[in-house]
Image (cartoon, coloured by chain):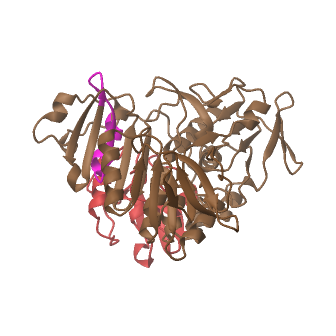
Chain colours: A brown, B red
């Protein structure tokens, strides 16, 4: 039987999608969504791209309009936070003093940005980017005349901010401690092409260089960055994008198992069967990685939310969705399907020099992932191949004239989960 | 204002009166219409807002661009001549009466 009420801790994409998916499945109990951001659930991907550039208006950042919560009978407590969980009494205590009973508890607590462990890291003008308030602060600072912007970290967030800042006319330097950009996420073939584009756009990209200190002007604003080799660079604004840390405080306080993230099983349950974890903070067993991992992506947040909603409604299935991810920088549309880090062989299709190509990644002769630049068809087909377990060998991919678009389209396998069939008939509803 | 009808695989329908500016995808998301995922939020990245425009439809839709065409190669359910990404269908009065069929699966 479905529990009488669900409390979702964290109102990011994973939290919101959990609440929405529960209602989509016809769950009729009480749903409370608690999030510390006063803005309510927002769409994070544009915060480092269109929102910063001013092309995506604030109104489009809310994942749902206020009317959605009333219409779906989802109680949204924005600007509040859960401070403790009483597993015995099955209640959570909020900062506001409110105490909520739960039948099922979903931890969607997300991540927070890492900061730089160097002198001057807390100076005015040294920013990180996670929520809408961070993005608004950064957007205002980037909306003025050209300045010297230094981005620390050549991951996706850092490079997206660099591309946006460059597009707004700023002088941009990227400093990365690793010998190459996007080292954790992409093959060298793809990351090298991305860096080449940044350089062609006039961004100074420094690889294998570490920040040693930040210095301020008389008013306490950051002015200069010093690198490990002693070079000093002008820095009116520093954006730190050196990864994130999962928010595990609530789980730790509830005596749940925490590693790098909240540890869950294949149904995304903690060792307490009434407590689940989803999204960026969940450390789950991935059949694609063959071990426990965390994934920070919209896909993972959305698909895990649906998996947990199904479990709460008594229709559980193991979480096995194919991971995918995207980024946009300048005119580069980057799309990644599967997990490519463990590859032992690659085949490149298309033309890297033209900026339209895909890197097919294999392990033991089996396709494990595909990275695409401006080849959206390759990406979509790759996701389907990986979902259906269709075999594709490196030898086939190397044949002259090989094109993923020309592969015979196999009928989509049954989805790995049952889709909702309890759709209700509805009359005229205003959008 | 345009009346948009979403027909689910089990035969039930959801009818929305949609105001511009909106897209056929966004209107569905705002009203929690099951069967439209739109994971990428409408940037033509993911192909999880796939719909089939009704074969009898006389509503004139915007031309498909090359990105939408490419993304449709990756849909979970079979692409047909009626396939569109609903995030690429902006709502205007011209879309009044549009009927779209939702696929069995989006991902």
Residue A84, by quadrant, is top right
Q: Position of residue A335 (x, y in %)?
A: 37, 48
Residue A363 falls inside the magenta stretch: yes
Residue B73 falls inside the magenta stretch: no
Q: Position of residue A359 (x, y in %)?
A: 28, 40
Q: Position of residue A175 (x, y in %)?
A: 47, 51
Residue B84, by quadrant, is bottom left
Which image quarter is the N terminus of chain A in? top right
Which image quarter is the C terminus of chain A in? bottom right
Q: Is residue A188 above or below residue A129?
A: above
Q: Residue furthest front?
A: A230
Left or right: A431 with respect to A104?
A: left
User: How many marks are shown on the rendered structure?
Assistant: 0
Q: At 32% across and 71% down in the image, what residue appears?
A: B62
Foreground residue among A358 and A226? A226
Q: Is residue B43 above or below residue A245?
A: below
Left or right: B107 with respect to A371?
A: right
Q: Position of residue A160 (x, y in %)?
A: 46, 56
Foreground residue among A19 and A108? A108
Which segment is the magenta one?
A: A362-385
Left or right: B65 with respect to A38?
A: left
Q: At 70% across and 34% down in the image, what residue appears?
A: A2
Residue A70, by quadrant, is bottom right
Decide if residue A112 is in sight here.
yes
Decide if residue B36 is in sight here.
no
Foreground residue among A95 and A205? A205
Q: Residue furthest right?
A: A97
């Amino acid at each position: 039987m479905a529990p009488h009420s669900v409390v979702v801790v964290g109102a990011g994409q994973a939290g919101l999608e959990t609440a929405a998916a529960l209602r989509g499945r016809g769950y009729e109990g009480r749903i409370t969504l608690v999030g510390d951001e006063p803005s309510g659930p927002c769409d994070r991907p544009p915060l480092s791209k269109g929102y910063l550039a001013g092309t995506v208006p604030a109104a489009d950042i809310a994942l749902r309009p206020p009317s959605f919560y009333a219409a779906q009978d989802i109680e949204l407590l924005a600007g509040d936070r859960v401070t403790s969980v009483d597993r015995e009494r099955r209640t959570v205590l909020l900062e506001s003093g409110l105490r909520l009973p739960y039948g099922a508890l979903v931890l969607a607590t997300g991540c927070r940005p890492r900061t730089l462990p160097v002198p001057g890291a807390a100076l005015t003008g040294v920013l990180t980017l996670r929520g809408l308030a961070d993005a608004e602060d950064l957007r205002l600072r980037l909306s003025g005349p050209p300045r010297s912007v230094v981005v620390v970290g050549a991951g996706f967030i850092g490079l997206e901010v660099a591309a946006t800042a460059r597009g707004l006319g700023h002088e941009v330097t990227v400093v990365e401690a690793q010998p190459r950009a996007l080292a954790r996420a992409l093959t060298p073939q793809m990351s090298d092409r991305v860096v080449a584009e940044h350089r062609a756009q006039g961004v100074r990209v420094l690889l294998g260089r570490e920040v040693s200190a930040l210095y301020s002007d008389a008013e306490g604003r950051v002015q200069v960055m010093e690198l490990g080799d002693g070079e000093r660079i002008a820095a009116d604004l520093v954006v730190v994008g050196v990864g994130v840390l999962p928010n595990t405080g609530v789980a730790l306080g509830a005596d749940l198992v925490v590693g790098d993230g909240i540890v869950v099983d294949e149904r995304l349950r903690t060792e307490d069967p009434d407590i689940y974890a989803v999204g960026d903070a969940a450390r789950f067993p991935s059949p694609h990685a063959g071990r426990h991992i965390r994934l920070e992506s919209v896909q993972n947040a959305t698909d895990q939310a649906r998996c947990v909603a199904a479990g709460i409604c008594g229709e559980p299935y193991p979480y096995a969705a194919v991971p995918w991810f995207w980024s946009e920088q300048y005119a580069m549309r980057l799309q990644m399907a599967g997990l490519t880090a463990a590859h032992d062989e690659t085949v490149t299709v298309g033309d890297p020099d033209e900026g339209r190509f895909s890197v097919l990644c294999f392990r033991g002769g089996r396709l494990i992932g595909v990275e695409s630049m401006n080849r959206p068809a390759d990406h979509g087909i790759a996701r389907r191949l990986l979902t259906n377990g269709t075999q594709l060998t490196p030898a086939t991919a190397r044949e002259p004239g090989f094109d993923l678009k020309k592969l015979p389209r196999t009928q989509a396998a049954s989805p790995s989960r049952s889709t909702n069939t309890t759709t209700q008939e509805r009359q005229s509803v205003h959008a | 204002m345009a009346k948009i009808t979403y027909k689910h695989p089990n035969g039930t329908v959801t009818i929305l009166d949609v105001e511009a500016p909106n897209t056929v995808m966004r209107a569905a998301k705002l009203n929690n219409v099951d069967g439209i995922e739109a994971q990428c939020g409408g940037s033509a990245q993911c192909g999880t807002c796939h719909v089939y425009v009704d074969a009898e439809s006389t509503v004139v839709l915007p031309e498909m661009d090359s990105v939408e065409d490419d993304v449709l190669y990756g849909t979970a359910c079979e692409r047909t001549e009626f396939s569109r990404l609903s995030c690429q269908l902006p709502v205007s009065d011209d879309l009044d009466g549009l009927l779209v069929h939702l696929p069995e699966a989006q991902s």
